[in-house]
Amino acid sequence: MVLLYREYGPAVYRRCLRLLRDREAARDATQEVFVKLLRDMGKLAARDTALPWIYRVATNHCLNLRRDVRRRGEQGEDALDLAPAAAAPYPAGRLAREVLARFDAQTQAVAVGVLVDGLEHEELASALGISRRTVHRKLARFLEGARQLLAGGEP
């Protein structure tokens, strides 16, 4: 596990920091991800490459943390600040959170991976353990649902 942490720890931390936008929370999340990996070491050993699975665990963990914070109504840094709050009457980060909240965790991971992190569909599919077609389909549904929400309807 120490070797995995040395090799993948920085990538996991960067992913957590990107999603949580808080250094301390990202450090905590990185540790929690590796604790989860320790518990599921058998699943890790059965994989050809560890990084996609570790990346998926980190992404899902951070999205769950964000969802839990939102449910409890706690305030925190916004991982999706796409524009300064003063630029629009409705802060972009808040709008992004509300739109994302309408979708399941996997669709959220796809949207964040492609639109925020700039990952290619193939790369994201590998990291999430889904097909490239599923990434494309979930992104298309997310974009259509977001357009409907922004137009004042329901997805």
Image (spheres, rainbow, N blue to C red):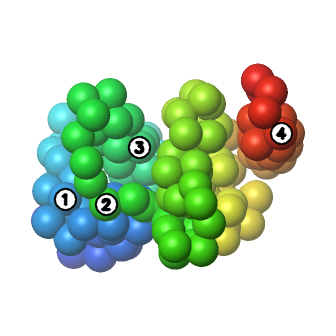
Q: Earlier in the sequence, mark 3 or mark 1?
A: 1
Q: Is residue 64 above or below residue 118?
A: above
Q: Which mark is residue 77?
A: 2
Pick the quarter of the image with the N terminus. bottom left
Q: Do the residues labelled 3 and 2 touch (CB within 8 Å)?
A: no
Kind of residue sitting beneath label 3: Leu
Instruction: Give, as a three-letter code, the residue at label 2.
Output: Glu
Q: Is residue 5 in view?
A: no
Q: Of the residues tagged 3 and 4, which is closer to the observer? A: 4
Q: Distance between the residues labelled 3 and 2?
A: 13 Å
Dots 1, 2 in contact, CB < 8 A: yes
Q: Which of marks 1 and 2 is nearer the N terminus?
A: 1
Residue beneath disc 4: 151
Pair 1/4: label in front: 4
Q: Which of marks 1 and 4 is nearer the N terminus?
A: 1
| Residue sitting farthest toward the front | 89
